[in-house]
């Protein structure tokens, strides 16, 4: 039987192919989710009641249901409603993860916006800024800096949660590992390699988040 080292060298390229898919899903989802989440978060603090309540309902609905269920709805339930809503596994994964992360990022955006001193908004209004101009030119740039560290933490969580895509036959890191196991029956070795790769991904992301936190703190 091959040693762990030689076995790892032999099958690492296969696992790295799955790792690329994992990173792509996480990266696209965090970008799309951030855009949606920021818009929803701003809508959440809107003084227009129908907008704020609609955003509040979205956050409540998404955060209150399991991510796996949301993934199944996008990939399995929507095609049953209308065949035109049939998506490849990768697209389904990005849609579901983007929708899910947007709800959490919206709460991050809301919290950071509300953490900015209200006096700055009042000062901007006294200088002739409209409410929209005050938000986008004065409040949001400061709030965005404060958003960066928790956004990084959300990205770390998304990398780990991305393993759920293996349930819809998307060959991410975990699914690729399972495929290798089916032909080698080397459970411990493969799962150990998968765990190590996840640890590398999350550790690198944690380092990036830590660097961002230190830089942001310089502006506080």
Image (cartoon, rainbow, N blue to C red):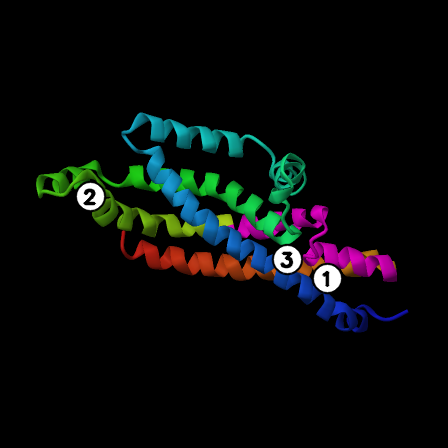
Label 3, residues with CA under 10 Å away: few <14, some 14-19, many ≥20: many
Q: Where is residue 123 in the image (x, y as percent from the top left)?
A: 12, 41
Secondary structure under badge 1? helix
Q: In which quarter of the image is residue 1?
A: bottom right
Between disc 1 and disc 2, whose residue precedes? 2
From the image, tell me which residue sits under label 3: 198
Give the camera-side residue of 193 and 134: 134
Q: Is residue 146 rendered to the left or right of residue 101? A: left
Q: Give the range drawn in magenta.
A: 155-184
Foreground mark, 2 or 3, reads: 2
Residue occupying the point 79% across, 58% down? 179
From the image, tell me which residue sits under label 2: 134
Give the camera-side residue of 92 and 27: 92
Separation of residues labelled 2 and 3 (CA atoms): 42 Å
Label 1, residues with CA under 10 Å away: few <14, some 14-19, many ≥20: some
Give the camera-side residue of 61 and 139: 61
């Amino acid at each position: 039987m091959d040693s762990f080292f030689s076995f790892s060298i032999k099958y690492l390229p296969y696992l790295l192919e799955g790792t690329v898919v994992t990173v792509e899903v996480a990266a696209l989802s965090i970008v799309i989710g951030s855009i949606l989440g920021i818009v929803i978060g701003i809508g959440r603090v809107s003084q227009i009641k129908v907008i704020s309540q609609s955003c509040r309902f979205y956050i409540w609905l998404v955060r209150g249901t399991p991510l796996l269920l949301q993934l199944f709805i996008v990939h399995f339930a929507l095609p049953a409603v209308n065949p035109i809503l049939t998506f490849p596994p990768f697209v389904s994964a990005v849609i579901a993860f983007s929708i899910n992360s947007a709800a959490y990022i919206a709460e991050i955006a809301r919290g950071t916006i509300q953490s900015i001193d209200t006096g700055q908004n009042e000062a901007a209004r006294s200088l002739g800024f409209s409410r929209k101009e005050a938000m986008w030119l004065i409040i949001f740039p400061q709030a965005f800096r404060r958003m960066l560290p928790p956004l990084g933490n959300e990205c770390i969580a998304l990398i780990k949660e991305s393993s759920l895509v293996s349930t819809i036959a998307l060959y991410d890191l975990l699914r690729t590992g399972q495929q290798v196991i089916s032909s080698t029956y080397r459970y411990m070795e493969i799962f150990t390699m998968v765990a190590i790769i996840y640890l590398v991904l999350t550790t690198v992301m944690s380092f990036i988040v830590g660097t961002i936190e230190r830089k942001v703190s310089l502006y506080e």
